[in-house]
Image (spheres, helix red, strand yellow):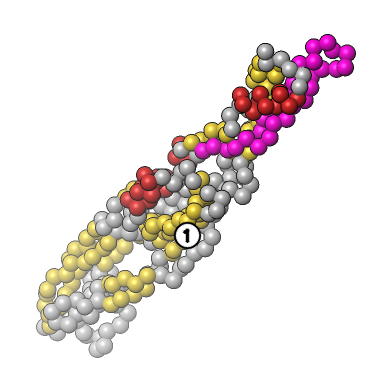
Amino acid sequence: MMVLVEKTESRRTVVGKYGTTKSVTKVYVLTGTSNEVVAKQYVKNETEASYEIEGLLGTPLYIPRSRIDLEPDWTDEDTDRGKWDVTVDYEAAEKIPTTVTGIFGFDTGGGTFHITQSKETIAKYPPASTDHGGAIGYDGERVVGVDIVVPIQQFPIRFYHDNSVVTEAFRQRLADLTGTVNDAFFKGYEKGEVLFMGASGSLREDLVWEFVYKFAVSRNKVDLTIGTKGSGHEIVGIDKEGWQHMWVEYESAIDETVHRPLKRPVAVYIEKVYDYESFFLLGIGV
């Protein structure tokens, strides 16, 4: 009768450069036959065809059995020629990366933003003209404002997922996270600075999914001032996270010097316009 017993030093593991399991080696002792063909077939039947490892977000992944080696553990003088040292290797294919390969590009072209308030009024002509406290384009009834380019860095991340990871629940999770902002530190950026703009994926011939995750960055601001400094009408100490929306409320007044109507900022509002979520749920690390 053949018996296969796993050794205590079994399950040696090699970790790849991305931090995932590259290979696992299991070692056994087989007794009960001196026929190598019979022994190898027995080992094949009694060992797993694939080895389970923990993948992204705890999802199980499986690396296939790649080789079975048998080495006889007897000499020509032994009467009992039925003992083998057995090695079973499980190895992930080199062409299948199972984790992030890095940011492969970026775009700092910026985005357009409509503002009604300047950072500073540089000059007025004539100098005695009404001070509107930085309000832009007041036409006698409303503050018209102007469109400017603001710094918004965009970056994609290419990531590879095993076919077993990309389930309907996984795809729905990516859809639900699209249009949300990071609720904690992510890829070098502070809470509130990164907007997830969605992901696209395609299944390759080797049954590996290739995804591109798209993000945009707008940096947080602290201690902003709205209005003309020293005018007595400025609003100071304003903090704003990158993807929050800031708008200014104005009041009507009369410039006592030139006796003309004007608009002055009286309040600043910081609005939450995107939900905050954990980007850990994207499965690409933080």
Magenta-span inclusion, residue 147: no
Q: Position of residue 64 (x, y in %)?
A: 60, 37
State which quarter of the image contains the N terminus.
top right
Say if 146 sits above or below 18 in the image.
below
Q: Nearer the viewer, residue 252 or 23?
A: 23
Residue at 21% from the left image edge and 78% from the top image edge: 144
* Picture coordinates of residue 280, whole percent (x, y): 42, 45
On screen, residue 37 versus residue 156, left or right, reads right
Residue at the bottom extreme of this rendering: 126
Residue at the extreme top of the image, as rendered: 79
Mainly helix, strand or loop, the magenta region? strand
Compared to residue 26, the image places residue 118 above or below, namely: below
Residue 244 lies in what quarter of the image? bottom left
Residue 258 left/right relative to 46: left
Magenta stretch: residue 77 in it? yes
Residue pictured at 23% horizontal, 71% vertical: 231
Residue at left offset 58%, top offset 45%: 18
Q: Which residue is mark 1?
A: 156
State how many labels appear. Answer: 1
* Foreground of the two, 210 or 231: 210
Start and end of the magenta stretch? Answer: 61-90
- Amino acid beneath label 1: Pro
Residue 74: which quarter of the image? top right
In the visual, does 231 lie left or right of 70?
Answer: left
In the rendered image, which quarter is residue 217 located in? bottom left
Give 78 or 21, whichever is nearer the viewer.
78
